[in-house]
Image (cartoon, grey):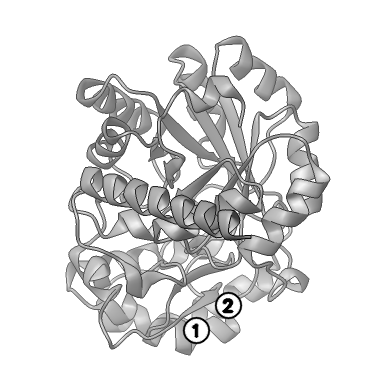
Amino acid sequence: MSSALTDLFPYPIVQAPMAGGVSVPALAAAVSEAGGLGFLAGGYKTADGMYQEIKQLRSLTSRPFGVNLFLPQPEYADQGAVEIYTHQLAGEAAWYETELGDPDSGRDDGYDAKLAVLLDNPVPVVSFHFGVPSRDVVDSLHRLGTFVLVTATTAEEALAVERSGADVVIAQGVEAGGHQGTHRDTPENDGAGIGLLSLVAQVRETVAIPIVAAGGIMRGGQIAAVLAAGASAAQLGTAFLATAESGANAVHKQALTNPLFTRTELTRAFSGRPARGLVNRFMREHGPYAPAAYPQLHHITAPLRKKAAASGDAQGMALWAGQGHRMARDLPAAQLVEVLAAELDAARTALSGQGDLR
């Protein structure tokens, strides 16, 4: 990682920007104060809502932090398939006594307005998901002194990130919880994800820019492994989801280590885009039939997910989680950063000792 960006946070630990109310200012502030890089999620918020959270975060810490944006999505969903899926969810709407959401509630997540906020009120770091920002956008952020990070799930996508002028590529392995950051989401991509260590190695041989590794990382030893593979830092989401400062629903936090939820899968059931979560009833019943239609399905299922969460029904919620979810620790965020840093040091010491023996 460039020395200037490294100087922003002492430990190579980045808290993933988890949308849906998880990555709140209190969490980002705690991580940044402890020596990692805290992140706010701009996704699913209004531009003003994002601005207010930035103001709140700045009142909690003077340390650097980041803000994440979703790229607008192109029109390629099969509208007939969306209508069929909507009819299939009629029983869910009746069960939860709510109406289904409007699939045409918006495709761009207020991207232009949110970008305008970040250009008028610069933050240290901005990351992008679901595509690559234009060179003009990257240059505009650079002129303000903002570092730009972009997610990639393949070496080819990483090359597109480098060509955009971005400072860092976030290599997201298939183990990651939540939405895969593929640049173009089509059904033929389903099941084609790459494991994190293999992805980091491929990206390292493809681009010259620094890499942040993301996907299933829960321990300091895993951070050491991705650093050894060529990454400059690690991004952790599920590990921070369980912390006290996380804005995740209590049912979601408890489900991470609940023996009832034994595995995760990638599913389109809740949003129309591949996202990894704990396998529950909703995913089993609807995942096989969900079309590639983001964000239409996200809007359609939003009222269902809200009612399920309000009633404490984990079987109807989108329980986003990475493959390492059973290793989640119920710790304050700052303490988790300290524990991860200590584990990283121990792993590095052990690796160094093995080198001496050889």
Q: What x and y, as percent, mark residue 332?
A: 18, 50
Q: Which of 137 and 75 is in front in this view?
A: 137
Q: What x and y, as percent, mark residue 158?
A: 74, 45
Q: What element carries label 2?
A: loop
User: Do the residues bearing badges 2 and 1 touch, measured as CB atoms within 8 Å?
Assistant: yes
Q: Residue at image x 20%, y 62%?
A: 330
Numbered tag placed on residue 233 in the rendering? none
State the separation of the CA atoms marked 2 and 1.
6 Å
Q: What residue type is labelled 2?
A: Ala
Where, by quadrant of the figure, is residue 188 drawn? bottom right
The vertical placement of 11 against 274, above or below, is above
Query: In the image, is 108 to the left or to the right of 41?
Result: right
Query: In the image, is 299 to the left or to the right of 141?
Result: left
Q: Quadrant of the N terminus?
A: top right
Q: Which of 112 and 342 is in front in this view?
A: 342
Q: Quadrant of the C terminus?
A: bottom right
The residue under label 2 is 290
Q: Is residue 275 visible?
A: yes
Q: What x and y, as percent, mark residue 25?
A: 27, 36
Q: What residue type is labelled 1?
A: His
Query: In the image, is 230 to the left or to the right of 157?
Result: left
The residue under label 1 is 286
